[in-house]
Image: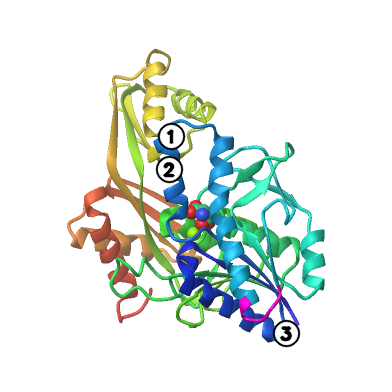
Amino acid sequence: MALIVQKFGGSSVADADKIRNVARIITETYRRGHSVLAVLSAQGDTTDDLIEKSREINRNPSRREMDMLLSTGEQISIALCAMAIERMGYQAISLTGWQAGMLTDSSYSSARIKRIRTERIRKELDKKKIVLVAGFQGINKYDDITTLGRGGSDTSAVALAAALQADLCQIYTDVDGVYTADPRTVQGARKLEEITFDEMLELASLGAQVLHNRSVEMAKRYNVNLEVLSSFTGNPGTKVKEVVKTMEKMHVSGVAKDKNIARLALVGLEDRPGIAFKIFSLLGKRNVNVDLILQSIGRNGSKDISFTVALPDAQLAKEVMEENREAIGFQSVELNENVAKVSIVGAGLAHNAGVASKMFEALYNAGININMISTSEIKVSVLVDERDAERAVQAIHDRFFSEFGNG
Ligand code: ASP
Ligand code: MG
């Protein structure tokens, strides 16, 4: 008998039939003799619809009230699912974030979980009840409702699995697992049987959109036994773990794209020490995260630096640069929002010299220009024009995952 945490995303609970389907998955697990705690997201587009509703009233509401509003979506799901389970003849109880003891810090709309008081959950599980917890929400020290940021229900589930030392945390979604690329847009994308936490982290933060990256960080930290699978097909999913069996063979495990970025270029900087320090500390002070950085070779005492930031930070980053034009000393700053980052990720990359050149070759053959390159132990990223992004992913994917195999 195990304790299993199951998380169901918005598409898995979108309507009454889907809620009944989820109730069936949960009760089947329960009938096999396991304790089950399920974490649910808001139904379908509910969260987006709630955001829309708030806009009709106030385009700049306080984040506290926003959290109050958005947390209602998940409550609808857990109550409805509890009713579906009751109807099937099992005992279920739904709990909001605060009832479940999810204590967070006070950053409304992007709260972090600090601790989980598990007494209530344990008590209900001991009574042999199926426990349904509202994802994405918690409570702060002022007894206010907080939310964890978009996609945060994955993190709720993993945090609960860690706190309860669950035997397994299953993330149910509308795809069969983690793929070598987005199966909705890339031909020939294949499901991975397993993937490492580190690879998954890269893929999640690169915009693969399967798992919230904070959930993967947490799963890695607490070594949670994680699995991603579909609530619709019943197929085996993808296991996410520390080390995988196939690691030796697989050089590249996935190709991802991220269009949610922009590039800033500072032209005509003085070529002297301290310039990069000045630029990136100014950005750091305003909480702008920088990703790829490229600095040109100095020529005649002058050089250029370009870097990428997340799209929502782009205007701010540009303003910060313009405000400090004198202090930094540059001729012009250019912002390009029509760029995309395309990356290959693989735990075996570091030890396989030819992999990056294979990626560049694929882009060359597709006639796609590379604007920036960055590499790390487990990934190679390139910046391309946004309009080339899909073609770039497909070309790279074909190169690594065609029938001739990976590597
Ligand atoms: N309902 C929230 C969202 O749409 C949280 C989640 O689904 O994970 O972002
Ligand atoms: Mg999600």
In the image, which disc is placed on residue 53? 2
Choose the circle earlier in sequence order: 3 or 1: 3
In percent of width and height, residue 153 lies at 57, 57
Residue at the disc numbered 3: 33
Q: Which residues are magenta?
A: 87-91
Choose the circle earlier in sequence order: 2 or 3: 3
In percent of width and height, residue 226 lies at 61, 69
Q: Is mark 2 within 8 Å of ligand 1?
A: no
Residue at the disc numbered 1: 57
Farthest front residue? 87
- Disc 3/disc 1 C-alpha distance (Å): 49 Å
Q: Quadrant of the C terminus?
A: bottom left
Q: Residues within 10 Å of mark 3 (few under 14, many from 20)?
A: few
Farthest bottom residue? 32
Q: Is residue 315 magenta?
A: no
Q: Residues within 10 Å of mark 2 (few under 14, many from 20)?
A: few
Amino acid marked by disc 2: Lys
Q: Secondary structure at mark 3?
A: loop
Q: Secondary structure at mark 1?
A: helix
Residue located at (74% from left, 39% from top): 141
Amino acid marked by disc 3: Gly
Q: Is residue 98 above or below residue 276?
A: below
Q: Secondary structure at mark 2?
A: helix
Q: Main secondary structure of the magenta part?
A: loop
Could one spot residue 22 in this view of the protein? Answer: yes
Going by the image, does 304 lie left or right of 133?
left
Cβ atoms under marks 1 and 2 closer than 8 Å = yes
